[in-house]
Image (tube, rainbow, N blue to C red):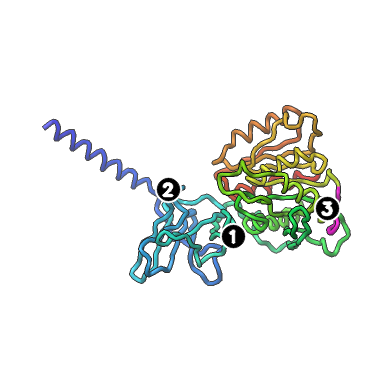
Amino acid sequence: MKNFLKISLFATSIVGSINFAQAQQPTIVEDFKPSVLNQPQQEYPQVNSQGYARFKIIAPAADSVRVSLGLGGRGGTKLAKAEDGTWMGTTEGPMDEGFHYYNVRIDGGKFNDPGTLNYYGSVRWESGIEIPAKDQDFYALKNVPHGNVQQILFPSPSTNTSRRAFVYTPPGYEKGKDKYPVLYLQHGWGEDETAWMNQGRANLIMDNLIADGKIKPFIIVCTYGMTNEVKFGKMREFKIEPFQTVLIDELIPYVDANFRTIAKKEKRAMAGLSMGGMETKTITLNKPEVFDYYGLLSGGTYASTDFKDKPKPKYIFLSCGSKERPDGIRKATEELKAAGFNADGYISEGTAHEFQTWRRSLLQMAPKLFN
C-alpha cells in the first residue's frame, strides 16, 4: 500500500509538472506575416508579432524536412507533412530580433529555402529571415536623402588579381566637392564584402543618422577580408599579413586616389565584426600611423598595455550582445578609461553573435567617429 501511494504521488507529481509546463507555454499569436526578406509573391517563411517563425516547404516526395533555426542548436525545427505534400512547422519559441541565416535539410541534404532571398554567410549563400525588432526604425528604408553604394574593382599586385570592395558615399556626394573621412568596415568569418550593406543595412543606418543630423557624413568601405582561406575552427591558421598588405598598400591608396577623401590618419577609422574585429585589432596595432579610430564589434577587446610604445588612438569602441560576454567588454572599457583612453563600451540587449548586435553597434559607434 505504501509503495502504491508512493507511485501514485510520483505519477501525480509528473502530471502536475507537465500541466504546469504546458500552462507556462505562451499561446502563439496567429498574426503571421511574410518575412520582409521573402522573394516576390512568396508567402513563406512568415513571422509573427512575438518573434516566432513559420516555414512551409514543398517537397511531396521527401521523408523528412527540418529547418536549421528554432531550437538553439538542438536540431532546428522539424516540419510536419500535410495532406497536400507540403511540409510546415513553427519554431519552438521566439527568435532573437533581427536578421538570421538558415538552411533547410531535406532527407539529410542541405538546401536553401526557395521562398526567401539568399545572403552570403557560413561560406555559402544561405537563406535569410528578418524577425521584426522593436527598434527597427533606425535601419528602415525611409523617405530621406540616400547615399549610393557602388562596387569597385581595385588592382591588387600582391594577390595577382583585381579585388572587389563596396563603397558607400553619403547623400550629395556626387554633386558636391567636399572631402570626407573614411571608415573601413570588415565582415565576419564566412561572410564577404556584401554583408554590411545587405545583412547589416549599414547604408540605411548612415542615411537615417545623417538625415536626423546625428552624424557628420563619411564614406564606408567594405572589402573581402579572407586573403588565405581557412575552414571553420581553424582561425589560428589565418595569417593577417596578406590582408594587411591588401588593405594598407592597395585598397586605401586606391580609395584616396579615386574618391574625395581626407587622406589623413585623423580622418580614417577601422572597425569589424567578429573575425573582422580580430583583423581590426591586429592591423590597427601593427599600423597605428594609418587609423585613429578603432572599433571591435563582438571581436575582442583592447587593453591599455596593447599600446605600449604606440600612440594613443583618438577613440576606441567595444561592443557585443548581452548573450555573448558582456562582462569582458565592460571590464576592458573601464580599464581603458582608467588609463586615459577615449573609449566606449556598448552592450546590445537581448541579442547574441548576430547582425542585430552589429547594426546597433554601428548606430552607437558612428556618431563618435571623426569628432
Please name the amino acid that badge 2 sits on. Arg
Q: Which of marks 2 and 3 is in front?
A: 3
Of labels 1 and 3, earlier in sequence is 1
Apparent side of residue 210 relative to residue 124 in the rendered image (left or right): right
Please name the amino acid that badge 3 sits on. Pro
- Per the image, label 2 sits on a secondary structure element best described as loop
Reading the image, the residue beneath label 1 is 119
The image quarter containing residue 80 is bottom left
Reading the image, the residue beneath label 2 is 74
For marks 2 and 3, give the CA distance.
47 Å
Of labels 2 and 3, earlier in sequence is 2
Residue furthest to the left: 1
- Per the image, label 1 sits on a secondary structure element best described as strand
Apparent side of residue 30 relative to residue 149 in the rendered image (left or right): left
Apparent side of residue 99 relative to residue 294 in the rendered image (left or right): left
Disc 2 crowd rating (10 Å Cα; few below 14, some 14-19, many 20+) is few
Q: Is residue 262 magenta?
A: yes
Please tell me which residue is depicted at 41% across the width and 52% down the height of the picture: 92
- Per the image, label 3 sits on a secondary structure element best described as helix
The range drawn in magenta is 257-263
Residue 130 vertical position relative to residue 16 in the rendered view, above or below: below
Reading the image, the residue beneath label 3 is 253
